[in-house]
Image (spheres, rainbow, N blue to C red):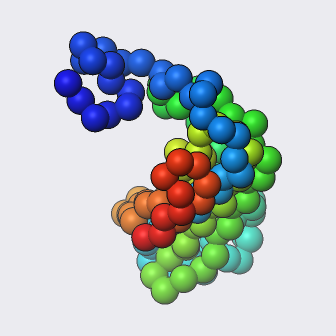
């Protein structure tokens, strides 16, 4: 009926059986961007916001989110993450967010990397919304993945 792995032959949702898949090293990298006014970016970089160090809070929130992905997205397997790194860096027009997640297992970490970036971007918005409500979270995407049956992929 469908080529989607999370849908069975009758159209019902299921958690994919990965028990027969080999254990391999896997890594995924995702990115996103929070567009903001120059004054808001200066505030974020100054560390003088009312809520504290905006970048550090977003990086920690992203790491926490990667670890909780299976609790947020119904068909994601719980994974033993061996590395989760989130970086928030100044860029033209706002803050760029990058997440790198690694595991050794039977399924990949693409969703964990995307969740980390998304939550880090949301945290930036939350911490800076008093200064600017018109910020835009954009361009959240997977940029690369390695390992597993489908092999390596780059955007």
Residue located at (47% from left, 60% from top): 142
In the image, residue 109 sits, relative to residue 29, either above or below, namely above
| Position in image of residue 7 (x %, y %) | 33, 24
Residue at x 50% of width, y 76% of height:
94
Q: What residue lies at 74% left-to-right and 71% top-to-bottom?
A: 47
- When the figure is inspected, residue 149 is found, relative to residue 44, above or below; the finding is above
Q: Going by the image, does 155 lie left or right of 144? A: left
| 1 versus 136 height, above or below | above
Q: Reply above or below: 2 against 49.
A: above
Residue 32 appears in the picture as rendered: no
Viewer-proximal residue, 13 or 37? 13
Q: Residue at x 71, y 51 (%)?
A: 25
Residue 29, percent from left and from top: 58, 62
Identify the image quadrant of residue 117.
bottom right
- In the rendered image, which quarter contains the N terminus? top left
Q: Please identify the residue farthest to the right as the structure is shown.
A: 82
Q: Nearer the viewer, residue 54 or 115?
A: 115
In terms of depth relative to the viewer, which is nearer, 109 or 45?
109
Residue 85 at x, y percent in the picture: 73, 59
Total marks shown come to 0
Q: Quadrant of the C terminus?
A: bottom left
């Amino acid at each position: 009926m469908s080529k989607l792995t999370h849908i069975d032959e009758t159209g019902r949702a299921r958690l994919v059986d990965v028990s027969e898949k080999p254990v391999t090293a896997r890594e995924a990298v995702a990115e996103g961007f929070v567009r903001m006014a120059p004054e808001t970016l200066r505030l974020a970089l100054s560390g003088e916001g009312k809520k504290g160090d905006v970048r550090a809070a977003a990086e920690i929130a992203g790491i926490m989110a990667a670890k909780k992905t299976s609790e947020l997205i119904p068909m994601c397997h719980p994974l033993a993450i061996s590395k989760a790194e989130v970086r928030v860096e100044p860029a033209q027009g706002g803050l760029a967010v990058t997440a790198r997640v690694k595991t050794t297992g039977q399924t990949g970490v693409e969703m964990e990397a995307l969740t980390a970036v998304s939550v880090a971007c949301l945290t930036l918005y939350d911490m800076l919304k008093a200064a600017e409500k018109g910020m835009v979270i954009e361009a959240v995407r997977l940029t690369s993945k390695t390992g597993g049956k489908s092999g390596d992929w780059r955007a």
